[in-house]
Structure formats: structure tokens, C-alpha cells
Image (cartoon, rainbow, N blue to C red):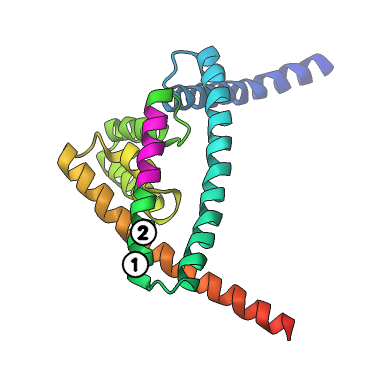
Amino acid sequence: MSAMNWLNGWMKSVPQTIAAHRYYQKISLILEIFFNAENNKEVAKKSASVAVGYAVYSYLDWKIVALGFVLVDFMLDSGFGFWAIFLFMWLVGMLLYVLIIIASDRSGRDFTLAGGQRRLVNKLFVRSKVLGIIAEVLMGITHVAWTGMAQFHIFFRDRFPRPLSYLLFIVLSGTQMYIWVHVYIRGINVIKYLWQFLAT
């Protein structure tokens, strides 16, 4: 009886084991595409390298955001108006984005993760054009609204003709910085108001 119970339990676990193996294979395939790797060993090697690069990049990215607050605050105190601040921050922002793109290309490390995202979306396009377009639009919105124009350019540069890619980079960089300068100024005003409120 116990042997039969064991056999029944083993037979029930077979489909679960097969499903788990298929799930593992799908995850392995996704990782190989994302990291542009040939096998699991190469995935492990490249993922470790990318993880370190992404951690450093994310740390520096937040430092740049903090530096932006300092620069905008300094320019406001120096009497500069919104458009002067916007133009300066736009030019500085584009310079930083270009440096990030060059560093990513020359290092061979996809530390922005945009290259891996592009490869996954390209694979998705092969399976379903509709899902590919949806994923592409969502990634584009994410990069413009949050992650940055360096990621946007890396993600889309092979999707559009080069002149259009550069034009989108310039225009959307300006749009993004226009929003961020408003955020900076409002944030600075709120911080100053709270500081004055607490000091009284």
C-alpha cells in the first residue's frame, strides 16, 4: 500500500517536474537573449559584469539628480530665469547622455540595460507584432518619463533612420528636461518653504 502511494505521488509529480523544467528553459532563453549570451555560463559571467556596471551607473545617476537640484538652486539664487536654467540644464543633460552612450558602447557592457531590452522586444516582435509594438511603446514612455534619454537612444537607434533617431534624442531630451526643471524648481520652493516654516 505504501509503495502504491509512493508510486501515485511520484506519477503526480512528473507533470510538475516537466512544467518546472520547461519554465526553467524559458527563463534561461530569456536571459540568454537579454545578455546576448550563448549559454548559462556566459549568462552568469555577463550578468555579474552588467550588475556591477548597473549598480555604479544607478549610484552616479542619483548623484547627478542631486547635483541638478544644487545647480538649479544656485542659478535661481543668481537671478537666472526659467528659460535660461532650462537651456543650460538641457545642454548639460544631453552632454551627459552622450557620454553615457559612448561609455556603454566602448565598454561593451550594457550597464543601462537598454540593449538587453531591445533584444527581448525584437524577439517578441518575431512572435507577435502587436505585442512587440505594445512593449516598444511602454519602454519608450518609461525611458522618456523616468530612466533617461541615453536608454531611449540605445533602445531605439536601430529602429529609426539615424537622422530621425538624433532628432528624437534632441527633442525628447528637451521635453524631458523641461519637465524636470519644473520639478526641480517646485521641489526647491517646497524645501525652502518647509525650512522657513520649521525655523520660525
Callout 2 crowding tier (Cα within 10 Å): few <14, some 14–19, many ≥20: some
Residue at screen point 34% across, 67% down: 84
Asked where in the image residue 13 lies, by quadrant, the reply is top right
Q: Say if 76 sits above or below 10 in the image.
A: below
Asked where in the image residue 36 lies, by quadrant, the reply is top left
Q: Which mark is residue 88?
A: 2
Residue at screen point 28% across, 30% down: 126
The quadrant of the image that shows the N terminus is top right
Q: Pinpoint residue 196: horizontal percent, then vertical percent.
A: 66, 82
Q: Residue furthest bottom?
A: 200
Q: Give the residue type at disc 1.
A: Ala
User: CA–CA distance between discs 1 and 2?
Assistant: 6 Å
Q: Residue furthest right?
A: 2
Q: Pinpoint residue 65: horizontal percent, then vertical percent.
A: 52, 54
Q: Say if 114 sits above or below 26 in the image.
A: below
Residue 21 vs residue 106, the one in the foreground: 106
Answer yes or no: is residue 1 visible: no
Q: Pinpoint residue 67: horizontal percent, then vertical percent.
A: 53, 55
Q: What is the magenta range?
A: 95-105
Check disc 1 and report the residue beneath it.
Answer: 84
